[in-house]
Image (cartoon, grey):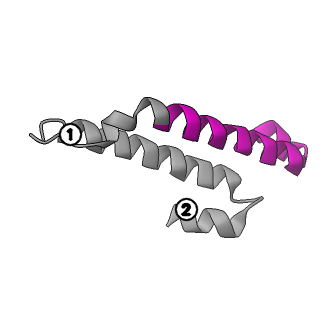
Amino acid sequence: VTEHYENYNLIGVSNEIRELVDQLSNWYLHYNRSAFIVNESGQNRAQVEKTFQCFAYALNTLSLCAAPVMPFSTEVVYR
């Protein structure tokens, strides 16, 4: 993404971000689907919180990278 920004290639930036969103939504969410659910005994609550924190970090970083080309959309995600 940095290389595309340095070359003012906004289409390249958008394509890289789109690919990252596809991978994040397809791979990460699918792989961790069960990790987002607290079991009935509540024993995995710490694991669920860590999974949410990791996902929030990924969304925050993604919104910072995408902000120059999608300022209004990323502002909603960042908040």
Q: Nearer the viewer, residue 22 or 70?
A: 22
- What segment is highlighted magenta in the picture? 1-29
Residue type of the residue flagged with mark 2: Val
Residue type highlighted by circle 1 = Ala
**In the rendered structure, does residue 16 fall within the stretch colored magenta?**
yes
List x then y, in percent, for residue 61: 56, 48
Task: Give the side of residue 38 with respect to residue 53, left or right.
Answer: left
The residue that disc 2 covers is 77
Q: On the image, numbered disc 1 is attached to which residue?
A: 46
Mark 2 nearby-residue class (10 Å; few <14, some 14–19, many ≥20): few
Q: Is residue 61 magenta?
A: no
Question: Where does residue 65 sit, x and y in percent of width and height?
Answer: 67, 50
Q: Is residue 49 left or right of residue 27?
A: left
Image quarter of the N terminus: top right
Residues at circles 1 and 2 in contact by the CB criterion of under 8 Å: no
Q: Nearer the viewer, residue 77 or 65?
A: 77
Secondary element under disc 1, as helix, strand or loop, is helix
Real-space Cα separation, disc 1 to disc 2, in angstroms: 24 Å
Answer with the quarter of the image where residue 31 lies: top left
Q: Which residue sits at x=18%, y=39%? A: 39
Q: Main secondary structure of the magenta part?
A: helix
In the rendered image, residue 59, in percent from the top left (x then y), is placed at: 53, 50
Left or right: where does residue 12 sit relative to residue 32?
right
Residue in view at x 12 percent, y 36 percent: 43
Q: Earlier in the sequence, mark 1 or mark 2?
A: 1
Q: Quadrant of residue 45?
A: top left
Q: Residue at x 84, y 41 (%)?
A: 4
Q: Is 25 on the left-hand or right-hand side of 55?
A: right
Residue 44 drawn at (x, y percent): 18, 36
In the image shown, does 12 or 19 lie closer to the viewer? 19
Residue most extreme to the front = 40
